[in-house]
Image (cartoon, helix red, strand yellow):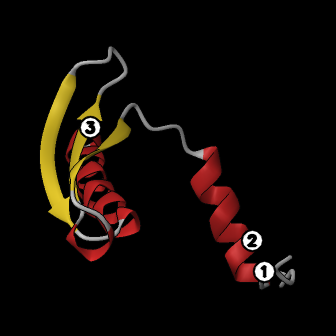
């Protein structure tokens, strides 16, 4: 079992702020081939209606592919808010 480390006060506030915001976009990842550092991921960003708004791909571990998709999602949210 992993030890539990409490979050600092600023991290808790940041975490709650991220969770309370509702985004109209959803990220979906799918593994297209490979494994480990050579894994090929395909990501899609869907709007509230389920339509694909943006797609892309990334090579590497799942968390890096998700981070790439998250950055694209944040850019979409930023352009939507303007």
Q: Quadrant of residue 72?
A: bottom left
Q: Name the residue furthest top.
A: 49
User: In the rendered image, which residue does mark 1 sit on?
Assistant: 7
CA–CA distance in space, label 2 to label 1: 6 Å
- Front disc: 2 or 3: 3
CA–CA distance in space, label 1 to label 3: 30 Å
- Label 3, residues with CA under 10 Å away: few <14, some 14-19, many ≥20: many
Point out the tag, 2 or 1, that comes first from the N-terminus.
1
Point out the tag, 2 or 3, that comes first from the N-terminus.
2
As drawn, 2 above or below 71? below
**Quadrant holding the N terminus:** bottom right
Q: Position of residue 41 (x, y in %)?
A: 23, 53
In front: 56, or 15? 56
Q: Residue at x 70, y 80 (%)?
A: 10
59 sits left or right of 14 in the view = left
- Label 1, residues with CA under 10 Å away: few <14, some 14-19, many ≥20: few
45 sits left or right of 54 in the view = right
Q: Position of residue 15 (x, y in %)?
A: 66, 64
Asked if the residues shown at circle 2 and circle 3 are in contact, with their CB atoms under 8 angstroms apart, the answer is: no
Q: Residue at x 34, y 69 (%)?
A: 61
Point out the tag, 1 or 3, that comes first from the N-terminus.
1
Element type at marker 1?
loop
Element type at marker 3?
strand
- Front disc: 2 or 1: 1
Asked if the residues shown at circle 2 and circle 1 are in contact, with their CB atoms under 8 angstroms apart, the answer is: yes
Q: Position of residue 42 (x, y in %)?
A: 20, 47
As drawn, 48 above or below 12? above
CA–CA distance in space, label 2 to label 3: 27 Å
As drawn, 18 above or below 77? below
47 sits left or right of 56 in the view = right
Q: Quadrant of residue 14?
A: bottom right
The label on residue 12 is 2
């Amino acid at each position: 079992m992993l030890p539990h480390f409490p979050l600092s006060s600023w991290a808790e506030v940041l975490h709650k702020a991220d969770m309370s915001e509702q985004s109209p976009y959803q990220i979906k990842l799918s593994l297209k081939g490979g494994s480990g550092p050579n894994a090929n991921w395909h990501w899609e960003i869907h709007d509230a209606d389920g339509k694909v708004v943006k797609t892309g791909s990334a090579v590497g571990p799942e968390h890096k592919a998700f981070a790439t998709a998250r950055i694209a999602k944040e850019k979409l949210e930023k352009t939507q808010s303007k």
